[in-house]
Amino acid sequence: MNARYILRILAAAVLATGVLGAGLASDAPLASAEPCPDEQVVFARGTGEPPGVGPTGQAFVDQLRARQPGKSVDVYPVNYPASNEWSTGLEGITDAGAHVVSMAGSCPKTKMVLGGYSQGAAVVGFVTSAQVPDGVDPATVPKPLAPDIADHVAAVVLFGTPNARAMNFLGQPPVVIGPTYQSKTIKVCAPGDPVCSDGMNFSAHDTYADDANIVAPGTDFAISRLAATPAAPPAGPATVVRAQTPAPGPSA
């Protein structure tokens, strides 16, 4: 499902009465040939986007690399269909979770940044969950990650995360960030984006990849977390950011 399709669904729901689901290879070259990079971005693309991390993920990775010269920043695109069939999002949760566990074991010094856009943000959000959502058979979904895995995740950066209204409309449980990841999570929402806010600007959901000012808060947060000491701060509520559009300049 592309952004325009989900927006049409949400628009119909709002007018009548408010994304869960990759790439086989990253669409960004690896920054280092070393087996264990300094950092790795594990990113899930949005619905209908081509294999890889998608345009929003690429914009985020590009900013992250530009801000950290000398750091090797690897990329792992979450492998899932990113299709209109929301049940296939389970494949993304399984793939991302397994990769994070594998990376923590094989490259314990690598700092991971988990990220996603739209449906991919929901997928990654569920990866952090501490428990299986109510109404979901535990036998049908991956077990929550072990608590110590969070020590290897520096930040969780989610763009256009489907809110409870969107997830409810799609018949999916709401995205709940696990307690161990809450203080290291940021949800970036474009101004007026109805997928992640109460706004009604249905074109806003398509703006993340094209507006550096919208992606920037997520990049700033990730860099601050990557630079932090290994000891994580006490768990607190996840940060929610409403990206701001630049103020218009004076008329000519």
Image (cartoon, rainbow, N blue to C red):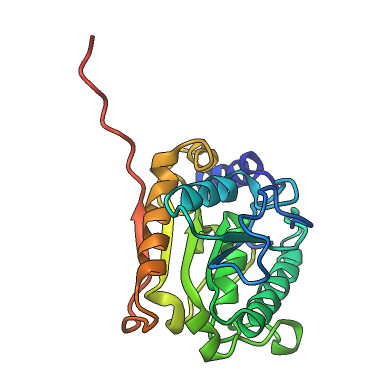
Quarter-wise, where is residue 103 in the image? bottom right
* Residue furthest to the left: 250
Q: Position of residue 78 (x, y in %)?
A: 69, 63
Quarter-wise, where is residue 245 in the image? top left
Q: Is residue 208 left or right of residue 145?
A: left
Q: Is residue 82 left or right of residue 107?
A: right
Inspect this view and state whether residue 17 appears.
Answer: no
Q: Position of residue 128 (x, y in %)?
A: 54, 77
Q: Position of residue 248 (x, y in %)?
A: 26, 25
Inspect this view and state whether residue 14 appears.
Answer: yes
In the image, residue 206 sits, relative to residue 121, either above or below, namely: above
Q: Which of 131 and 150 lies nearest the eye of the viewer?
A: 150
Q: Is residue 58 left or right of residue 158?
A: right
The residue under the point 72% across, 72% down is 95
In the image, residue 220 sits, relative to residue 207, either above or below, namely: below
The residue under the point 37% across, 52% down is 217
Q: Which of 129 and 214 lies nearest the eye of the viewer?
A: 214
In the image, residue 193 sits, relative to residue 233, either above or below, namely: above
Q: Is residue 224 left or right of residue 194?
A: left
The residue under the point 65% across, 52% down is 53
